[in-house]
Structure formats: structure tokens, C-alpha cells
Image (cartoon, rainbow, N blue to C red):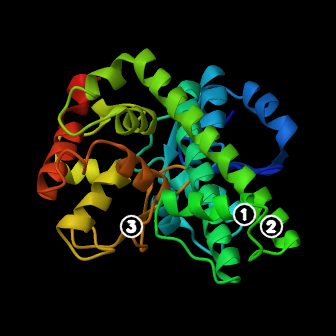
Amino acid sequence: MQTVTTIGLDIAKSVFQVHGVDAEGNVLIRRQLKRRYVLAFFEKLPPCLVGIEACATSHHWSRELKARGHNVRLMPPAYVKPYVKRQKNDAADAEAICEAVTRANMRFVETKTPEQQSCLMLHRTRQLFIRQQTSVINAIRAHMAEFGIVAPVGRKGVEQLLDVVADARDRRVPEVARACIAALGAQLRLLKAQILEFDRRILAWHRSNETSRRLDELPGVGPALATALVASVADAKAFKPTMASASLFNPSLVRICCMFLVPSGEAPDGGSRGFSGSTGEPVTGGTVTNSYLGTVLSLSSVGRRFRPAPQFALLSVVRVFGTAGWFI
């Protein structure tokens, strides 16, 4: 009787696609599965190699299938795409995943733990609050400018505008507009409080994690960058301590290289590289844009300690990635 040895699993929100082959490459399974039947289906199979694209929810399914005895390998979607033989659909994607996972030169993504994903969620939620804060500040300035009231750039300028709104004796702002801008001011104060709360949560996570504390000992690395690195890299020992290999898994390094060494949008190897916002995996063909890790860099001590000579900040980060395996 033929036995399934390799499975390509195209995950989704509701309907999953499974493509399974035996040791000879003969197709044994090609079917759809509703979400509630996925785990029951894999429980009935003997342990096999399961390939999944590293995308949203992939780390969850990787942990679940590993707990059931399967060997799960996550792959960046950009590295799976060349194996798609025909038009893009779920069946073709699952077949391509099944083919790609067996390649000896394929680069795989380590599965993140729930703790690592929780730390990444701290950073991303904080970044969401920062974007909302910027949006509210811009709205306040734009609305006040409609009545000829402007203020200098910076935090104090926004506070000056809110002071004008709070002064009932100032008749330059109509009552209806005053109520609207006062509501925006209240929202702005709430966002600032939430950002400070998440700063404290990130610092607490940093203090509770030994690896993050050890990375913080490196010059130019603060709690924000250390926690982001620990949460983003599931297993640093899987990477060689070189700048080229570090650029493959950490958008921050490529972002700094593009900022200081090469034209915008070009990677150190001369190509162009972007990164998935959900997984942080390399995606060829795009520009280096990752607002989340870019914000992490701005929060960290990189650029503050070494502002007069940015190249030292680059060397510091390279040192972090080059010695991350030793630290972890």
C-alpha cells in the first residue's frame, strides 16, 4: 500500500488545500479541507514532511502539526512561487509547496513560539497606536489651520492648539468645531497613554528574557531592538554570522544598509528586496519598506548613540546579527 510521505498544505481562513505524494512522487491526495477538519485529517496520517508557506497563521499550524508528530517546514512565499506550474489557485499552490519543500537548497523559516509572537504583537500594536497618533495630530493641525490658527512643528505646537480650543473665551474657533477638535484632543491623550503603557510592557518583556538582556549589552542596542530581534528570529543558530546571511532574515539590517550604503530600495547584494509585514520574510522585487521594524530602529539606541557617524550604527547592528547565535 502506498504511503504519503510529503504534503503541501495551502492554508487559508476557512478552506485549506492538501496535496500529498508518496516517496516516488506519485500524487495520492489532492483535496480541500474545511478548517475544522484539518487537525483530524493529519491525526490519521503517519508522520510525514509537511510544507507550508510562511504567511499569516502559518506558525500556529506549524506548532499544531508538529505536536501531532509531523515534520513541518515553513518557506517564504517568494521561494515557492517559481514552482507554480499554471495559473494561481489553491490546488496549484499546494502542489508547488509540496514540490518546493523537498528541494535540498530551499531556505526554511523556523517556527516561532507563542511567546515570540506575543512580543511581536506588542511592537505591532504599539506601532498601530503611533500611526493613529500621527493621524490625529495631523487632523488637529489641519482643522485649526482652516480657521487661520497654526502652531510650530513638534509636540508643544499641538499642545498650543489644544490650549486654544480649551479656552472658551477664544472666539476664533466656532463651537461645533471646538467640540470636534476637543474630541480629537481627548483621543490624542488616550493614545499617548497607551503608547507609554506598551513601552512599559516591552521593557518588562525585555527584563524577563535572558537572551534579550544579553543582546542589550551590545553597543548601540536597546530594549526595543533587542526584544524585536529575539521575537523575530526563532533560531539565530540557523544563520551564519555574516552580513549577507543576516540580511536574509532581518529587514532592519537591510533598511540600515539602504539608508547609509546603497541607493534607496536596493539591497546590499545589488538586487531589490522587500519584506512581508506579517512574517518578515524576504520578498524579492519590492523596495525595502517595513514600518514596524523601522519604528523599532527609531526607538532603539541605534542612531542616538551613533548619530554623528551612522556607519558605526550599521557596524553595531551587523555585530548583533553576527554574534546572535553565540548570544542565544
In the rendered image, which quarter contains the C terminus?
Answer: top left
- Horizontally, is 289 left or right of 270 in the view? right
To which residue does mark 1 refer?
A: 165
**1 is higher (above) or lower (below) than 267:** above
Tell me the crowding category of disc 1: few under 14, some 14 to 19, or many 20 or more residues within 10 angstroms, Cα based. many
To which residue does mark 3 refer?
A: 288
Tell me the crowding category of disc 2: few under 14, some 14 to 19, or many 20 or more residues within 10 angstroms, Cα based. many
Query: Does dot 1 land on a helix, a strand or a loop?
Result: helix
Query: Does dot 3 land on a helix, a strand or a loop?
Result: loop
Q: Dots 1 and 3: beta carbons under 8 Å?
A: no
- Horizontally, is 125 left or right of 110 in the view? right
- Mark with earlier residue (1, 3): 1
In the rendered image, which quarter contains the N terminus?
Answer: top right
Q: Amino acid at mark 2?
A: Arg
Between marks 3 and 2, how big is the CA–CA gap?
41 Å
Q: Quadrant of residue 270?
A: bottom left
Between marks 2 and 1, how big is the CA–CA gap?
6 Å
To which residue does mark 2 refer?
A: 178
**Nearer-the-camera pick, 290 or 286:** 290
**Nearer-the-camera pick, 227 or 179:** 179
Q: Amino acid at mark 1?
A: Val
Counting from the top left corner in percent of width and height, residue 273 is at: 37, 67
- Mark with earlier residue (2, 1): 1
At x 55% / y 36%, what residue is drawn?
196
Q: Amino acid at mark 3?
A: Val
At x 59% / y 39%, what residue is drawn?
121
At x 74% / y 69%, what residue is drawn?
170
Query: Is there any visible trace of residue 240 in the rendered image?
Result: no
| Foreground disc of the pair 1, 3 | 1
Q: Dots 2 and 1: beta carbons under 8 Å?
A: yes
